[in-house]
């Protein structure tokens, strides 16, 4: 069953492309027709591409890796910040910091600087600082929070990027391509789909269209995270059962060994008593023979 319906996409305005004079010829396979000088996107192909992208994102989240969402345009900022923060994935909604992927260690240092400022504010030395110094540090912290606050949990390079409007986020696209990071993107009729691994031909300017696509991707990621949780719980249960089984086997082996030891001891006692009895019988025979000779 497809994750989105034709009517949903139609109501959200996903099919509206750009003016014909602004189109990119590479998007021709995804254009259905032209109406009033505007290109109309083929929603049947959009549905197929949404399902492919959602399934791939589900598998990535199931493996426990991170997906970085990038949407700095005004229509998408609040939508991405709300939807993506709810599933604990990193996102960039303000400005793409140049070299974020290609120079990732430097970005991590800036993130660590935020935590060091937080520790400084809790320290007693903070009270001894002048008002001017406090103001400068506070402004620096706010600036870092605005740009990097949403990627604090991103401790290594993401497994994939999801981009809204590849034309606007061309620097992010270039960095991901350079590092061979898979790119998922909403691609409009004025954009170049070359180099995008998972293309979702759609209107990347309307807030309703962005909301629908992002919500669908978030649902797929939630499914992947839920599957991962179930698998981990199952693995823990299997480990506990295995430990119990091993413990049970050890106890049974111990009982069997102890029983064997007891049986061996009993056997030795019986053999000793039997040998004693045979010795007594031989003594009696000798005594009887002596008595006969005397007579």
Image (cartoon, helix red, strand yellow):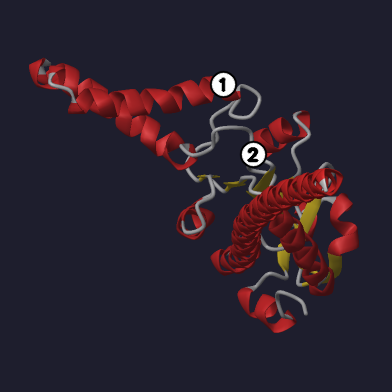
Note whether residue 158 is visible: yes
Q: Earlier in the sequence, mark 1 or mark 2?
A: 1
Note whether residue 61 is visible: no
Viewer-closest of 213 and 234 = 234
Q: Is residue 27 left or right of residue 15?
A: right
Residue 286 in the image: state x and y as whole percent: 82, 44
Residue 95 in the image: state x and y as whole percent: 50, 37
Which residue corresponds to mark 2?
158
Which residue corresponds to mark 1?
105
Q: Secondary structure beneath disc 2?
A: loop
Q: Answer yes or no: do the residues labelled 1 and 2 have beta carbons within 8 Å?
A: no
In the rendered image, the residue lying farthest to the front is 295
In the rendered image, the residue lying farthest to the right is 29
Residue 30 in the image: state x and y as whole percent: 85, 63
Viewer-closest of 275 and 50 = 275
Q: Quadrant of residue 195?
A: top right
Q: Quadrant of residue 236?
A: bottom right
Tell me the residue at 77%/46% (across/down): 287
Residue 197 in the image: state x and y as whole percent: 81, 48
Q: Secondary structure beneath disc 1?
A: helix
Tell me the residue at 65%/63% (across/down): 227
Crowd class of label 1 (few under 14; some 14 to 19; many from 20; radius 10 Å): some
Viewer-closest of 92 and 225 = 225
Quadrant containing the N terminus is bottom right
Tell how many labels: 2
Tell me the residue at 46%/42% (across/down): 150
Crowd class of label 2 (few under 14; some 14 to 19; many from 20; radius 10 Å): some
Alpha carbon separation for disc pair 1 and 2: 13 Å
Check residue 45 in the rendering and tell me which mark sits there, or answer none: none
């Amino acid at each position: 069953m497809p994750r989105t319906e034709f009517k949903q996409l139609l109501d959200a305005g996903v099919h509206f492309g750009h003016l014909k004079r602004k189109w990119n010829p590479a998007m021709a396979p995804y254009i259905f027709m032209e109406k009033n000088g505007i290109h109309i996107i083929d929603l049947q192909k959009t549905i197929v591409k949404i399902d492919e992208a959602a399934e791939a994102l589900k598998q990535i989240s199931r493996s426990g890796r991170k997906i970085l969402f990038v949407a700095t345009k005004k229509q998408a900022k609040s939508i991405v910040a709300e939807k993506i923060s709810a599933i604990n994935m990193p996102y960039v909604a303000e400005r793409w910091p140049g070299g974020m992927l290609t120079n990732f260690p430097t970005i991590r240092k800036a993130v660590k600087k935020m935590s060091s400022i937080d520790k400084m504010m809790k320290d007693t030395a903070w009270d001894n600082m002048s008002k001017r110094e406090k103001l400068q540090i506070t402004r620096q912290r706010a600036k870092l929070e605005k740009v990097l606050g949403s990627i604090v949990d991103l401790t290594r390079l993401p497994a994939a990027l999801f981009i809204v409007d590849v034309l606007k986020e061309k620097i992010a696209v270039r960095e991901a391509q350079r590092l061979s990071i898979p790119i998922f993107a909403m691609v409009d009729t004025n954009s170049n789909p070359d180099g995008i691994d998972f293309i979702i031909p759609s209107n990347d300017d309307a807030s309703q269209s962005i909301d629908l696509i992002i919500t669908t991707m978030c649902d797929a990621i939630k499914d992947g995270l839920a599957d991962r949780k179930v698998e981990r719980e199952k693995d823990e249960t299997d480990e506990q059962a295995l430990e119990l089984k091993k413990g049970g086997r050890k106890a049974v082996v111990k009982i069997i060994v102890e029983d064997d030891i007891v049986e061996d001891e009993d056997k030795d006692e019986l053999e000793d008593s039997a040998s004693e009895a045979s010795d007594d019988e031989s003594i009696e025979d000798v005594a009887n023979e002596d008595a006969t000779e005397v007579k």
